[in-house]
Image (cartoon, helix red, strand yellow):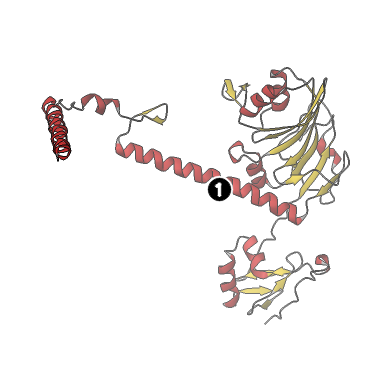
Amino acid sequence: MIGMPTPRDRKNPESNPKVRIQRVLAEAGVASRRACEDLVEEGAVTVNGRVVQGLPCFVNPDEDNIQVNGRRIQKPRRHYYIMLFKPRGFVCTSSDPEGRRRALDLVNHPSGARLFSVGRLDIDSSGLLLLTDDGELTNRLTHPSFEVHKGYDVSVRGRVEEEEIEKLRKGLYLSDRKKGSATRTAESGVTVLRRDRDRTRLYVELREGRNRQIRRLMERIGHPVKKLRRVRFGPLKLKGLAVGEWRELTPAELGTLRRASTAEARRVIHRAVVEKRKKAKRKKAGEVTVMGRPLKADPVKRAGKPKKPRSTGAKTGSRSTGARSASGRGRKSGGKGSR
């Protein structure tokens, strides 16, 4: 029976990189953490040839030989998450046939991992760019339905008035190559940071990522972009880096980023489920819809519904009753007066 290794030192996590064995088994795809705990208690797990029969147990997944029912588990693949302060003049593509400078060339990571950018910044823009080899997280962060917001510091030519700011907030129509027509952009947050006679500085927050969206929006209102820098990506802020420098995300930053992407994904799934239930309910009730939207009243049922006949006698009767009550009150009052 193997002894219980000591957990890592909290003051210096790198001094003893050991984690709980059930976590290692779960990340390797053996089973859930609870089921992995049962496997350990049953004696089905060995570490370096010795049976583990008690919890807690801490192991080093990079060095220890961990087996379940005689089969060695696969080491969980480590992903890398990089924040880069992209300068102007660099493209975000993995390969460029024109031979332009790539943002990936600025990151010389010692792991040699094949990184790719999470979303893109055009060649004339600078700012926060995420690089990773985690495809699942990249999909959640870039998919338009998940609506992970991005913040930009934008300087434009000319003085942008409040009417134009309101148009930007509500959205403008831009050509969409995927749909083959012009569609309105989603609502966005726009804050004026500084406004001069010949220059305006704005903070723009987007929840969608169309090609050169901010530049096209500013051109629509007659204020071309002079400088554009991304300063925020979801909960992450561009800080602690000079232009062209990079660093790995801290565990806290990575945790907030994952939670933000997961929360947005849950909202999207919830909205889809609610909409599906509404459609099923309308279909079951035979409700008439136009362009996917329900009508307030069914015109077929409304046309076939018989009209109620008018009962003139009831109205006449009500008038006579009212007259009698009025006359009665009059006689009664008159009687009182005579007394």
Quadrant (top left, top right, bottom left, bottom right) of the C terminus: top left
Q: Position of residue 89 (x, y in %)?
A: 85, 29
Judged from this view, the residue extending furthest toward the front is 339
| Label 1: how many Cα within 10 Å (few below 14, some 14–19, many 20+) | few
Can residue 72 be seen by looking at this rendering?
A: no
Q: Position of residue 117 (x, y in %)?
A: 74, 39
Q: Position of residue 124 (x, y in %)?
A: 81, 27
> Where on the picture, by quarter, is residue 180?
top right
The residue nearer to you, when weighing 335 against 62, is 335
Residue at which label 1 appears: 266
Left or right: where does residue 330 sit relative to residue 131? left
Q: Is residue 236 above or below residue 16?
A: above
Residue placed at 32% from the left, 33% from the top?
287
> Where on the picture, by quarter, is residue 129?
top right
Q: Position of residue 148 (x, y in %)?
A: 65, 41
Residue placed at 61% from the left, 49% from the top?
262
Left or right: where does residue 150 sit relative to residue 98? left
Q: Is residue 85 above or below residue 289?
A: below
What amino acid does circle 1 point to?
Answer: Arg
The residue nearer to you, when weighing 200 against 26, is 200
Name the secondary structure under disc 1: helix
Judged from this view, the residue extending furthest toward the top is 222
> Where on the picture, by quarter, is residue 83?
top right
Quadrant (top left, top right, bottom left, bottom right) of the N terminus: bottom right
Residue placed at 77% from the left, 67% from the top?
63
Residue placed at 73% from the left, 24% from the top?
215
The residue nearer to you, when weighing 307 against 212, is 307
